[in-house]
Image (spheres, grey):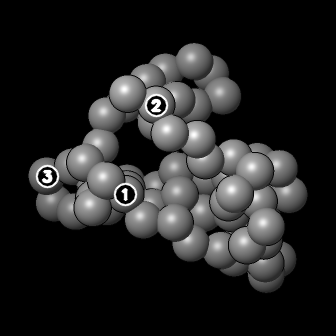
Amino acid sequence: MTTADGKTRAFWERNLRFRTDSSWAGPEKGAPALMPAGMMGDRASVIFAAPDEIAKTVEARC
C-alpha cells in the first residue's frame, strides 16, 4: 500500500479490507482513507467514497 505522501506499507492480502462509505462522514471522492485495524497493526481498511473507485485505484504489483 502506497499513500499519497509516498509512504509504503506492506499488508498480507487477507489483512487488507476494502470498504465504501458514501455518507457525509466518508472520505472525499478520489481520496480513499486508510484506517488501521487489529491490535497488532497488521490489518487495515481502505475506505472509498463509492464502489466504482475501488477498481480505478487498486493495481497488482509484485
24 horizontally vs 1: left or right: right
Between discs 1 and 3, the one toward the N terminus: 1
Report x, y in % for residue 34.
Answer: 52, 50
- Local secondary structure at mark 3: loop
Q: CA distance from mark 2 to mark 3?
A: 25 Å
In contact (CB < 8 Å): disc 2 and disc 1? no
- Local secondary structure at mark 2: loop
Residue found at x 46% / y 31%? 61
User: Foreground mark, 2 or 3?
Assistant: 2
Amino acid on which the number 3 mark rests in the picture: Met
Q: Is residue 48 visible?
A: yes
Q: Is residue 10 above or below residue 55?
A: above
Report x, y in % for residue 58.
Answer: 61, 47
Q: CA distance from mark 2 to mark 1?
A: 15 Å
Tell me, for residue 40, which label it has, or none. Answer: 3
Amino acid on which the number 1 mark rests in the picture: Leu
Q: In the rendered image, which quarter is residue 6 located in?
A: top right
Residue found at x 75% / y 50%? 56
Crowding at dot 1, Cα within 10 Å, few <14 / some 14-19 / many 20+, comes out as some
Q: Quadrant of the C terminus?
A: top left
User: Foreground mark, 1 or 3?
Assistant: 1
Tell me, for residue 61, which label it has, or none. Answer: 2
Report x, y in % for residue 54.
Answer: 67, 60
7 horizontally vs 56: left or right: left
Amino acid on which the number 2 mark rests in the picture: Arg
Between discs 2 and 3, the one toward the N terminus: 3
In the picture of the structure, the residue carrying the numbered disc 1 is 16
Between discs 2 and 1, the one toward the N terminus: 1
User: Foreground mark, 2 or 1?
Assistant: 2
